[in-house]
Amino acid sequence: MAISLNWKILDMVRESDGGVISVSFQCKAIDNNYVTHYGSAMTFTPDSSSSSYTQFTDLTESQVLDWVFTKLPEDTCQTKDEIETNLKTEIHKRKGLAGLPW
């Protein structure tokens, strides 16, 4: 079975005007009974005068994940692809070290 990767927004903190200032997120890698994940949080500085500003109630998970993917290298020194590769490598290591000898 192929390793499935699932990115998810876990929580957001917003200012009273609705501007998002913090996002908690996770990427989970699953291959049958093998699971590993990477999770973190990052801060944002909302600019309600920007043409790309979206009201809190109009945000989608996909849009917020795009923010996360864009800011990952700055906050974590890793890209989305690098995190996914590391998770897949961890699954492969676990599969090679797990199990019974009989």
Image (cartoon, rainbow, N blue to C red):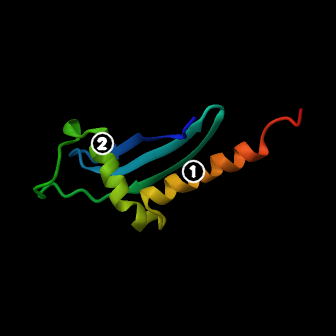
Q: Distance between the Cα atoms at labels 2 and 1? A: 21 Å
Q: Dot 2: what SS? A: helix
Q: Are marks 2 and 1 in contact (CB under 8 Å)?
A: no
| Quadrant for the C terminus in the image | top right
**Percent coordinates x, y for residue 90 in the rendering:** 64, 51
Residue linked to disc 1? 87
User: What is the crowding at mark 1: few (fewer than 14 residues within 10 Å), some, or many (at least 20)?
Assistant: many
Q: Which quadrant of the view contains residue 74?
A: bottom left
The one nearer the camera, 4 or 40, is: 4
**Percent coordinates x, y for residue 34 in the rendering:** 65, 37
Label 2 or label 1, whichever comes before in sequence order? 2
Q: Amino acid at mark 1?
A: Leu
Residue linked to disc 2? 62
Q: Which mark is residue 33?
A: none
Q: Is residue 40 above or below residue 11?
A: below
**Percent coordinates x, y for residue 20 in the rendering:** 29, 49
User: What is the crowding at mark 2: few (fewer than 14 residues within 10 Å), some, or many (at least 20)?
Assistant: few
